[in-house]
Image (cartoon, helix red, strand yellow):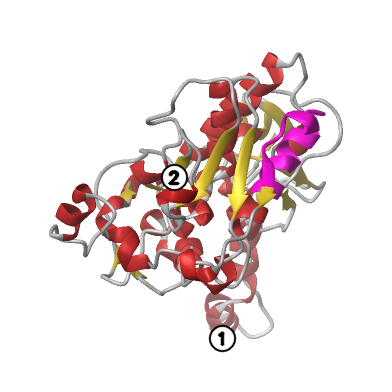
Amino acid sequence: MGQQIAFAKNACLAARDAAEGCRDCLNACPVGALTQGEQGPQIEKACMGCGRCIVACPTGALASSEFDLLHGLVPGDTRLRLECRATPRAFLDPGTLVVPCLGGVTEEDLVALALAVGMREIEVVDRGWCEGCQAGLGDRPAQDLVARTDAVFQALDLGDAAPRHCFEPLRPAHRLDIRERQRATRRDFFRRMMPARELVGPSANHPGTRRSRRANLLTRLAARHGKPVPASLHPRLSVSAACRAHQVCHAICPTGALGALRDESRRGLVFEATKCLACGWCANACPESAIEAFDAGTKGEFLDGPVVLVRHATQTCVRCEDDFVGDGDLCPACVKSRALFASGPLAARRAASAPEGGHHHDHA
């Protein structure tokens, strides 16, 4: 079922920078069907289409129409149930939304569904057999999905409107195995006849796609209920006084969450939390170890748009005339250059060639 998964190379962190080594999708796959290639993840025949890789991907580079909860949504005023495809049709309520695996649904998907159905109650049904399923990884994806989504609703003080986890166990004998699920429709039959070796099709074109979607959904959900978006629902960066505005962090940021602030006399950084993945690339790249990345912000209302993280006054290097942040008359590059000139191989040669009792003058 690998051909159901769509892949966008431009949004994949591993495809953009293999050195950083993002392996979230590979680590999430319960059957090891993903391998890392030069162009990003490659898929093998073992793929069950469970969607765990989609949920694990921080950028939205992976997607599947099989997990589009809004497709085929039937209007109504009764409860709306979400179930795994392992549940036989005889046990499904009319209008139930069925996905290949509840482990492939993101909290953003559930928030989008809640916005679409208004006041209808949403129930995520747990039949109690996830732990024994090959795609279950021994955990309870239905429970985990609801917990992640509930955290969003609780942060907005909307706990009563959050989707509910419903534990309604069935005997294991009722569960459709993975092969029966793949044979469920004629469409799936023809899909199996197609090549499934590589992830194909565009799902996003930028690493910030999933974060942008999340921010938009949170804003809409909060506005519908007259609530502010709390800062705790977005990542946060902290920059210490050790920062020297090298702006390496800005250059390496995969989503553009960090921007350069520069004018005639100041240099610094601006930050947009709605674009941030909290991937930590900036912190790892900072030569001064001045940056810390956090998954969640502090208490209080979220401030949308670019926010100034740090601003430094600059001065001009007396040697190269470049602007820099720091103390002294020389920029860090010139300080290093002078040190090398004074103590490196050239210094030894000058000392050896100097007249006895004399010395060279350093004009560097």
Q: Amino acid at mark 1?
A: Ala
Provide residue 219's location: percent of width, then percent of height.
64, 22
In which image quadrant can residue 351 be found? Answer: bottom right
Q: Amino acid at mark 2?
A: Val
In which image quadrant can residue 266 be found? Answer: top right
Provide residue 86's location: percent of width, then percent of height.
44, 58
Q: Secondary structure at mark 2?
A: strand
* Residue 333 visible to the viewer: no
Depth check, front residue: 174 or 252? 174
- Direction front: furthest residue: 90
In which image quadrant can residue 34 be found? Answer: bottom left
Disc 1 crowd rating (10 Å Cα; few below 14, some 14-19, many 20+) is few
- Residue 38 is left or right of residue 263, and the answer is left
Considering only order in the chain, which callout, 2 or 1, is on the residue closer to the N terminus? Answer: 2
Q: Please give the label number shown on residue 98.
A: 2
Disc 2 crowd rating (10 Å Cα; few below 14, some 14-19, many 20+) is many
Magenta highlight range: 146-165
Q: Is residue 245 above or below residue 130?
A: above
Depth check, front residue: 240 or 254? 254
Depth check, front residue: 310 or 60? 60
Q: Secondary structure at mark 1?
A: helix
The residue drawn where x is 44% and y is 25% is 74
Q: Please give the label number shown on residue 352.
A: 1
